[in-house]
Image: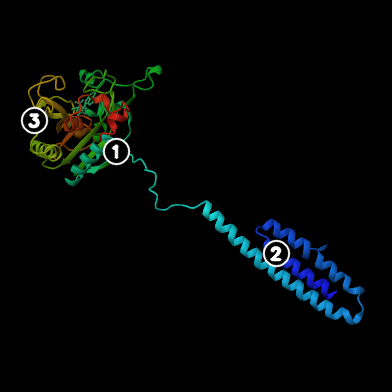
Amino acid sequence: MLTELEELRTKALAELSRIDNLSELEKWRVRYLGRKGALTSVLRGLGSLPIEDRRSAGATANDIKALLEAELQRKEQGLREKELVAVLEQTRIDVSLPGYPVPLGRLHPTTRTLREICDIFVSMGFQIVEGPEVEWDYYNFEALNIPKDHPARDMWATFWLDTESGDRSRLLRTHTSPMQIRLMETVRPPIRALMPGRVYRYEATDATHESMFYQVEGLAVDQGITMSDLKGTLFEFARRLFGEGRKARFRCDYFPFVEPGVEMAIDCFICQGAGCRLCGNTGWIEILGAGMVHPEVLRRVNYDPDIYTGFAFGMGVERIPMLRYGIDDIRLFYGNDLRFLKQF
Ligand code: YSA
């Protein structure tokens, strides 16, 4: 029996040393240590030995069992480590390789300009206020001193909502001026506010006109505000935005909600004032309308015009990057042509 056990031990260890994968190892375990394995059957046969041999054979068999189990564990650990190293080798990551470039988005030229305009006015003490694009006739016209059937309504070709019912009380705002009323209804002077947003006009497009564009409305109301405050503020704005070299001018204009009213223009960047297609041969590009808030408008919001005065302005945003970057057609802004947009 002892010789048989010795041979079994030698054979099992020799086979174990040749094994190089986990599935072979499992077969080896079943062959020697499994319930029907070689060593287990030897242990079972111990009962048939004479009592004097049984003890030493039993002890030897148990030693061999313990040895084989320990060797099995050692081998399994070694093979698992080898397997892990192989997997790591196969899926190796070269951290020194350059990564895939992440395409960076950019701000739309209108957004950039809006931010610049807001920054300049915020630094002068103005606060930003926003309001609805779907507006009531009352705010867009009526409260701005433009009653129904007033010829000045023709200045703002309007997209009316609810046209099927014939109701003409809701519209897409044609300018940001309704925000003047909304703000003055909710706060008392002093006011220094800047109100940016989209506006809509029911009109044919051309190089300088879109049916949807952005405006920025400005409003300052306080005691003792004069036309020179308006001029000083807007000329300083133009100087900061366009630089010293660009010329700016004020000319009389008419808006029912101001008295007096002006338009402000900048000299044309293409012809440098000589006259061309873009500026309609005038040499100037109009960027905003402005004026002193009409006393009727102040009364409408219960401000006493004998105590308070104010100035207001409304500028077209797209015209500004047109002037600065030499863009000769406003329709490029919302045409979604990446070749145009990527330049900014
Ligand atoms: C006037 C006096 C105030 O106290 C306050 C605001 C205003 C401006 C007035 N609400 C208004 O909308 N005037 S406007 O019709 O002449 O437009 C103002 C600016 O918007 C223009 O100077 C121009 O720069 C731009 N604009 C007008 N129509 C446009 C346009 N930009 C692009 N496409 C159009 N269709």
* Helix, strand or loop for disc 1: loop
Q: Which residue is mark 1?
A: 107
The amino acid type found where label 1 is placed reads Leu
**In the rendered view of the protein, which quadrant contains the N terminus?**
bottom right
Q: Which residue is mark 3?
A: 249
Question: Which mark is drawn over residue 199?
Answer: none
Tell me the CA gap for discs 1 and 2.
68 Å
Residue 270 x, y percent position in the rendering: 13, 26
**Residue 16 in the figure: left or right of residue 134:** right
Q: Nearer the viewer, mark 3 or mark 2?
A: 2
**Mark 1 crowd level (few <14, some 14–19, many ≥20, 10 Å Cα):** few
- Residue 16 is labelled as 2
In the picture, measured across the screen, residue 189 lies left or right of residue 14, that is left
Of 90 and 195, which appears nearest the observer?
90
Q: Nearer the viewer, mark 1 or mark 2?
A: 2
Quadrant location of residue 211?
A: top left
Please tell me whether mark 3 sits on a helix, a strand or a loop: strand
